[in-house]
Amino acid sequence: MEFLRPYLDTYASAINRFDPMDRTSTVGASDVGQCERKVWYTKHVGTEFEAVPDAEYVDSYGAKLRGTLFENVFWAPGLKATFGERLLFAGEDQQTFVSGYLSATPDGLLTKLTIEERSLISKMTGDETATIGTEIMVEAKTYDPRTNLADPKTENVFQTHVQMGLVRELTPYKPTHSILSYTDASWWDTGSEFIIEFDPQIYANAKSRAERIMTASSAEQMSPEGWIGGGRECEYCPFTKACGVVRRRVPDAQVLANLDPEFVGEVTKIAQAVKQADAAVDNDTAILRDLQERLKATLRNGNVRKVPGIVVWSSVKGRAGWDNKAIREAAMEAGVDVEQFATEGEPSDRLQITLKG
């Protein structure tokens, strides 16, 4: 039971400036790199396509509000204090740029970069000969301190290309790079910065991707990229049930009397690829485990568990669990009807490759 929390939740809803339901006609730069099926569902909630979020899904506002507050009270004012009028589209001056089905609201654009500033940015790229223009995008991100940020997040990099592309297309400014700035959510004096060079092909791909998502007439036309990528993105998706229904939908007919040879050829080709990929996964897993064991042995022989900036090896406490069999037996001995607590999991599907060779 909580007293203050409900009031804080209400206030958070009032000041949260980004509502995914507001962008129903375009795909935002922060969305376009996410699972395309998830984005499609988000854009079609309440439409004739009947995209329905999971009933038990709760949209946690914490991370989004954290980023908004960080930008408004610290990041944008901090940069404005140094760069003044050279900082555009930041803080209260943020603008949303739209082209076709693609949109973006950048965190800022630095203009009139000096020779010294451009030289420093060039060094940050790792290539001191890199040509840095007089304008550069800036993008702020906060991250959980438990996150490993050896490299920028793929969806964030994609976002910067969209921002640069839209600004280049719709304004006189031509940013050549973007500074993707990450700040530790717990320690604001800690973070990492990555310099992203604009790639016009990535921007073109983003525009095509946004159009494909917005014009698709069914979820089946969208790839379940989050699930394909391992399911981590699915943990924060409000459409896991709807997506699961689409993925598990098995055709009614088991086999047709006369199958089209071209269709059979296509199925055969994909089935062979599945078998080859499955074998490759087994082989890669064995290679990975062997390398991991060699690394652990090397650390063990050196009597160290940490090499700064390279590797950390630590013990992990086992997860708490329940002996369900023992609990069931104890309940039955106590005269409890355990069947009343029986549940049925989500339906699944099974794909067997019977192709020989």
Image (spheres, rainbow, N blue to C red):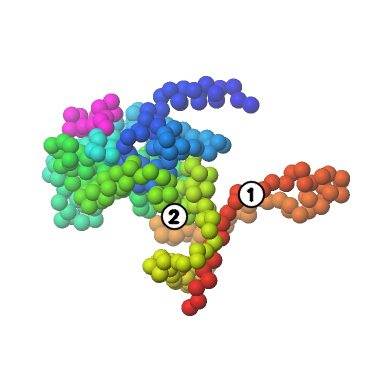
Look at the numbered disc 1 and give the secondary structure of its residue: loop
For the residues labelled 1 and 2, the Cα–Cα distance comes to 23 Å
Q: Position of residue 117 (x, y in %)?
A: 17, 43
Mark 1 and mark 2 lie on one chain; the one further toward the N terminus is 2
Q: Position of residue 318 (x, y in %)?
A: 63, 54
Main SS, magenta region, reads: helix
- The image quadrant where one finds the N terminus is top right
31 or 294, which lies in front?
31
Q: Residue at x 20, y 39 (%)?
A: 167
Q: Taking the image as drawn, is residue 167 in sight?
A: yes
Asked whether 89 falls inside the magenta stretch, the response is yes
Q: Residue at x 60, y 25 (%)?
A: 2
Task: Give me the disc on residue 40.
Answer: none
- Label 2 belongs to which residue? 229
Q: Amino acid at mark 2?
A: Gly
Q: Amino acid at mark 1?
A: Gly
103 or 316, which lies in front?
103
**Left or right: 133 with respect to 155?**
left
- Is label 1 in contact with label 2 (beta carbons under 8 Å)? no
Asked whether 115 falls inside the magenta stretch, the response is no
Q: Residue at x 45, y 66 (%)?
A: 259
- Label 1 belongs to which residue? 345
